[in-house]
Amino acid sequence: MLTVHNLHKSYQVGKTTYEVLKGVSLEVGKGEFVAVMGPSGSGKTTLLNCISCYIPADSGEITLGNRQLAKLDETALASVRNKQLGFVFQDFLLLDGLTVQQNILLPAIIGGTAGPAMEQRADQLCQVFGISAIREKYPAEISGGEKQRTAVARALINNPLLILADEPTGNLDSKSSRAVISSFEQAKQSLEATIFMVTHDSFAASFCDRVIILQDGVVWRVLEKGTLARTTFQDQLLDAIREGVKPMRHFS
């Protein structure tokens, strides 16, 4: 599904070069729910931006399905972003002048595929995520959790290969955060969605099948949930994060 191999990315600031990704490699299989965690500056956001085709890597390979993204021109990359990737952002990014249903349909409208079939899929997604009753309401009229569930439904409208979620619970209270994670679980179980989530939230990450921890631009640890209880897995994540932060404090 998604393969990242030996990915490098640097930024030039004045005469100084900052290497952010230092040979990151990972795989995400179809139907997996995978999180990436790590301290600020570990490379999480840069990795997500490279996978989402918004910034080019310096070297390495990103393969989505059977396509190597580095070999695609800008027109093809735009098509990948619209049709094969679904995005869920921390700040929802719903359009205030559109209803819930219209917001869900937006990627199909942009991609020129809107029509009765897509409207039927939007209705199905509203049912899956429990937002049918609010589909004619506007973003200002619904709760934070409802906005985020709308954003998850929008990410799925084009039946993408992969959902990329950037801190989806970052601005939500605990109840709304749980509702969003439930939406991801429902997307995985009912729609066989594949989800790649960047998060600081150990609670959200504890629902994932696997958590990749970045530190200083490299994959430092990979934790598998397996048959562990969610709370036990969260404790393991917190222990790993604390262990990883200790060496960084020495240099601060």
Image (cartoon, rainbow, N blue to C red):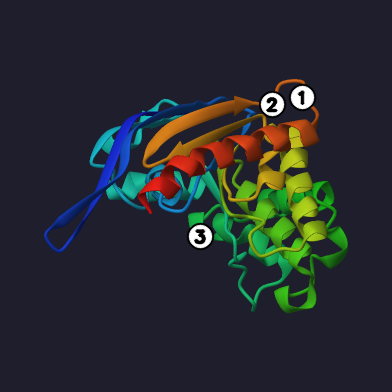
Q: Is 131 located above or below residue 232 in the figure?
A: below
Q: Residues within 10 Å of mark 2 (few under 14, many from 20)?
A: some
Please state if 162 lies on the left or on the right of 185 as rendered. Answer: left
Q: Residue at x 67, y 29 (%)?
A: 209
Q: Which residue is mark 1?
A: 228
Tag 3, which secondary structure? Answer: helix
Tag 2, which secondary structure? Answer: loop
**Viewer-side residue, 193 vs 37:** 37
Q: Residue furthest right?
A: 133
Task: Tell me which amino acid carries mark 3.
Answer: Ile
Q: Which residue is mark 2?
A: 225
Mark sitting earlier along the chain (2/3): 3
Task: Tell me which amino acid carries mark 1.
Answer: Leu
Marks 1 and 2 sit apart, C-alpha to C-alpha, by 6 Å
Q: Residue at x 67, y 32 (%)?
A: 236
* Residues marked 1 and 2 touching at CB (< 8 Å): yes
Q: Residue furthest top?
A: 227
Please state if 2 lies on the left or on the right of 24 as rendered. Answer: right
Q: Residues within 10 Å of mark 1 (few under 14, many from 20)?
A: few
Q: Which residue is mark 3?
A: 110
Quarter of the image containing the C terminus?
bottom left
Q: Residue at x 63, y 55 (%)?
A: 168
Q: Is residue 160 visible?
A: no
